[in-house]
Amino acid sequence: MIVAGIDGGSRTIKAALFDTSAGEVIGTALRDQGIDQNRLAEELLDQTLARCGVPRADVTAVLATGYARHLMNFAGRKVTEITCQARGVSHLCPGARSVIEIGGQDSKLVRLEVNGTVDDFAMNDRCAAGTGRFLEMMAGRLETSLAGLDRLVRQSREPAVISSMCVVFAETEITGLLSCGVAPAEIVVGVERAVAERVVTMAGRRLIDPVVFTGGVALIPGMREALERALERSVMLCPMAQHSGAIGAALIAAEQ
């Protein structure tokens, strides 16, 4: 039996296919968001199926999650991203007790029960501070890409102090730092440290080890290390971090 999970995030749409007989993920894909989110998501699903050689008729269930889940008319069920991230991370990282998920325009912290179900969560979805959009702004201002941050992170010796977490004000602050001769490498690590410290504030006393970091921002060079320093504990990088929500959606579809 083949089931599908679709995660309509704020910046990208992700798809995952799960074969219940084999007990494994057989395909994943992603694409940028757009205006017609239902059409884009269904096209992504069809492309993923074609690449895996699975006819659409063989898909027994499709479950949608994420911001755009209610727009996906082809999905049989819709479930919140908190629940799907918990299920996906529990599958990819058995034994996880805390999940830090930072996406394009929000960040979440989920505490899990021993069996992997949601115990408690906190979420920042009111502002782009501490999200992928915040880091994209920084990379653009420094005339590099998110992938290009790796080189700068390795060059840093003394992180710059970033006092503002507002995207608009932080961009002005970065411009001022550059004009004062502060090296881009120091700004990058300073911004990542500021993002990590915001997560610490949101976490409060919710964290229980093991802690797993997932979402698109988890793939940005230096972010996991910044979180470890801010939290003063080890943080595990989730395999398939961009697709953990879609994988969780597929798993829930299979179970239900």
Image: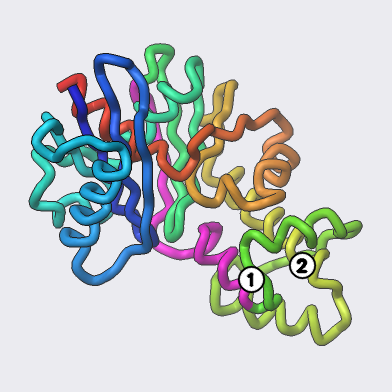
Locate residue 137: give its quadrant.
bottom right
Report if residue 83 is visible in the image: no
In the picture, residue 85 is in which quadrant? top left
State the residue in front, 245 or 59.
Answer: 59
User: In the rendered image, which residue does mark 2 sit on?
Assistant: 187
In the image, which residues are magenta?
117-140
Q: Name the residue carrying label 1.
A: 138
Q: Badge 2 local density, few (<14 within 10 Å), some, or many (20+)?
A: many
Residue placed most toward the observer, 208 or 9: 9
Write the residue at 41% across / 41% down: 243
The amino acid marked with disc number 2 is Ile
In the rendered image, the vertical position of residue 12 relative to residue 102, given as above or below: below
Decide: marks 2, 1 in contact (CB < 8 A)? yes
Q: Is residue 8 magenta?
A: no
Q: Is residue 9 visible?
A: yes
Instruction: Give the number of callouts.
Output: 2
Q: Give the percent coordinates (x, y) of residue 201.
A: 58, 46
Identified at 45% across, 58% down, the residue is: 104
Residue furthest bottom in the image? 179
Q: Percent from the top left, x then y, of residue 119? A: 37, 24
Mark 1 packing: few (<14 Cα in 10 Å), some, or many (20+)? Answer: many
Seen at 68% across and 72% down, the residue is 144
